[in-house]
Amino acid sequence: MRKNIDMLNGSLWDKILLFVLPLAATTILQQLFNAADVAVVGQFVGKNAMAAVGSNGALVGLVVNLFNGVALGANVVIARFIGEGSRKDINRTVHTAIAFAVLSGIAMAVIGELLAAPVLKALGVPDEVYDMALTYLRIVVAGFPALLLYNFEAAIFRSRGDTKTPLVCLVVSGIVNVGLNLLLVIVFDMSVAGVAIATVISSVLSGAMLFVIMLKGNETFKVSLKEMTIDTRLLVKILKIGLPAGIQGSMFSIANIIIQSAVNSLGPDVMAASSAAFNIEIISYYIVNAFGQATTTFIGQNYGAGNIPRCRRVFRLSLLMDSSVTVAVSALILLFGRQLLSLFNTEPEVIDLGMIRLIAIVGFEIINGLVDSVSGAMRGFGRSLPPAVLSIIGICGLRVAWVYTVFAANPTFTVLMAAYPLSWVATSAMIFVAYGIMIKRIQNYIPVRHP
């Protein structure tokens, strides 16, 4: 069965779905496996352990989002070369991306181990949660090399339209993760250390499986250990697109760390509720993000081929499909919100607080979808800096300002959560204007063919 999608010819809506469904399933399953960490400690250890795991989400996300953005840069560069038919550059970019992922992962693991304690202190993690939070963080950051390797590998597969292979590898590693969670926490009574170890082992497994597949791949995408070097020219291309996206994601995480610090100030019940709600709400975001990545990849290939009208059709169709699916999924999450929250913790006050977050975020996810789709389109065209700058201003800036002004004057969970929809509304307005300006400037684009 053919796994790669021909993005340059034929109909679009069915191919977008073929791209989006496995990708959305991959990221949702990834989150569900992460949620298993929270659920297991919440049910079998207690809400303090649950809060300890949840309090690290934004911090780990800071690093992961930075390098996921860079991985997206590799996706766009490879997709562009596919559109141009430059096989040699495709293969060199694949090797550069993988080498960069491993080296970056090692560097971030070392930095993470050194900064874990002072960062958690700075976040104001409560004393009753601190020791467990530190244990979890130190173990998880040790797995950064494997985690970044898998994410870059998955981006490479996505660039050629294959979103199924990363899904299969993730399913296998995720099942191992859940099994180890239950074994290490229930049988060996390892608490948060158990779920952290399970997370690292599953990351190693998923990264290794994709790497073995790439060792046996076709000529263009085949990986060779002897050729594992970084091509500076191609790395610059990757970073030119990926670094703004990565900085944008990291700034989101910084803003969310500040919000997490505000959540921490409201006590363990709010921390536990926020952690549980996050692991549910993120499902709707991953659907939004899958359509955004489809937009980026489809436009990247067609832009490389010089087919601007098809690029515009991709954007319009993906935006329509994204909005429709997001509304349906968000409605289901809100309808069954209390039942879903009870999977993490059954205390009524925790569930009530969790619903506050779900309503504020899932209820307005469609607006976030607009931001993600337009950003994805602009990155596909190679314009990564404008959406990054506008998102940092509109989303990160507004959220940080909100915490230190409005929330400071009225420190309630409801007021804090209002920062999310307000920031999306402001950013969507700015980014649509930027897209309109950009598309007018590239109408006469002529692709540069590589020898």
Image (spheres, grey):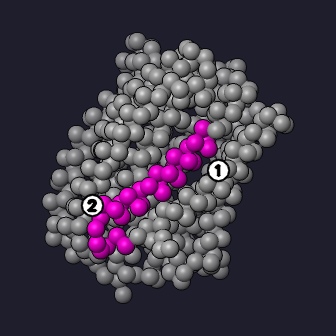
Answer whether residue 186 is magenta in the image: no
Q: In the visual, does 322 lie left or right of 206?
A: left
Displayed quadrant of residue 131: top right
Q: Amino acid at mark 1?
A: Gly
Q: Amino acid at mark 2?
A: Val
The kind of secondary structure the magenta stretch mainly shows is helix
Residue 314's disc number: 2
- Helix, strand or loop at disc 1? helix
Answer whether residue 22 is magenta in the image: yes
Displayed quadrant of residue 191: top right
The residue lying furthest to the top in this view is: 410
Give the residues drawn in magenta, as a range: 6-35
Q: Position of residue 252 (x, y in %)?
A: 44, 40
The residue lying furthest to the bottom in this view is: 451
Residue at image x 30%, y 50%? Answer: 321
Q: Earlier in the sequence, mark 1 or mark 2?
A: 1
Which one is nearer the viewer's eye here, 118 or 340? 340
Residue under numbered circle 1: 174
